[in-house]
Image (cartoon, rainbow, N blue to C red):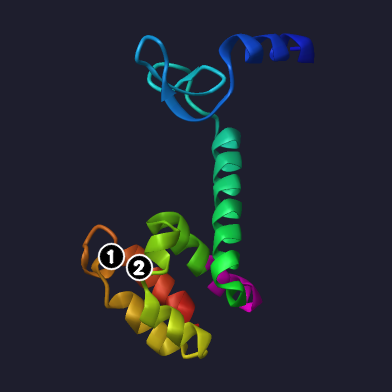
Amino acid sequence: MNEAFIKTIMLAEGVRYTGYQDHKGIWTIACGHNIEKGPPLTPGVIATILKDDLAYVRSKISQRAPWIGDLPARRQEVFIELGFWLGIGGLFCFKKMLSAAIDGNWHVAANELCDSNIFRDPATRNRTSRLARVLEG
């Protein structure tokens, strides 16, 4: 499809950067993509959205805790995953874990992560354990 046609559709549909309900109450995103009954997102689109989301989370984390950017990649990824999963505010509620990480006390940081509701929840215990193991090294 040519660019002129794409621009025509974008003008007709409008561009929205967050989900919204159209004039019929149907949940939609971007340029009229019907979330409820439209074609499913492709793996490529999903990967692109996730990469953009993770880059956004990384930038927000680096604003509040620039020292995380100096860590080995795997430990950085723990903080990015937590920020993505729990929200930036949720990540920064782990004050004792973050304090231990700043001090390089990875055993304590891992234990603090496991002393949490996300660890106690059977639905998220395995994920939390995996992240704690990465922190501990």
Q: Amino acid at mark 1?
A: Ile
Of residue 83 and residue 128, the one placed in the foreground of this image is 83
Which region of the structure is painted magenta?
69-77
Front residue (pair 18, 101):
18
Q: Nearer the viewer, residue 122 or 76?
A: 76
Which residue is drawn at the image coordinates 38% and 58% (left, top)?
86
Residue at (71% x, 14% y) in the render: 7
Q: Does 13 lie within the magenta span?
A: no
Which quadrant of the rendered structure holds the N terminus? top right
Mark 1 is surrounded, within 10 Å at the Cα level, by few (under 14), some (14 to 19) or many (20 or more) other residues, namely some
Give the percent coordinates (x, y) of residue 87.
Answer: 42, 56
Q: Which residue is mark 1?
A: 118
- Is 23 above or below relative to 49? above
Instruction: Place residue 61 in its image quadrant.
Output: bottom right
| Residue displayed at 35% across by 75% down | 113
Q: Nearer the viewer, mark 2 or mark 1?
A: 1
> Looking at the image, is mark 2 or mark 1 earlier in the sequence?
1
Q: Callout 2: 10 Å neighbours few (<14), some, many (20+)?
A: many
Q: Looking at the image, do the residues carrying marks 2 and 1 touch, with CB atoms under 8 Å apart?
A: yes
Calculate the distance from the C-alpha at mark 2 to the C-alpha at mark 1.
7 Å
> Which three-letter amino acid code belongs to the residue tagged 2?
Thr
Kindly identify which numbered label has been placed on residue 40.
none
Residue 16 at x, y percent in the picture? 54, 26
Q: Residue furthest front?
A: 64
Q: Position of residue 63 (x, y in %)?
A: 59, 65
x and y percent of residue 24 in the render? 36, 9
In the rendered structure, the answer to whether residue 29 lies left or right of residue 95 reads right
Give whichever of 4, 17 is nearer the camera: 17
3 w.r.t. 109: above or below: above
- Residue for badge 2: 128
Q: Which residue is pictured at 47% across the width and 78% down the height?
A: 135
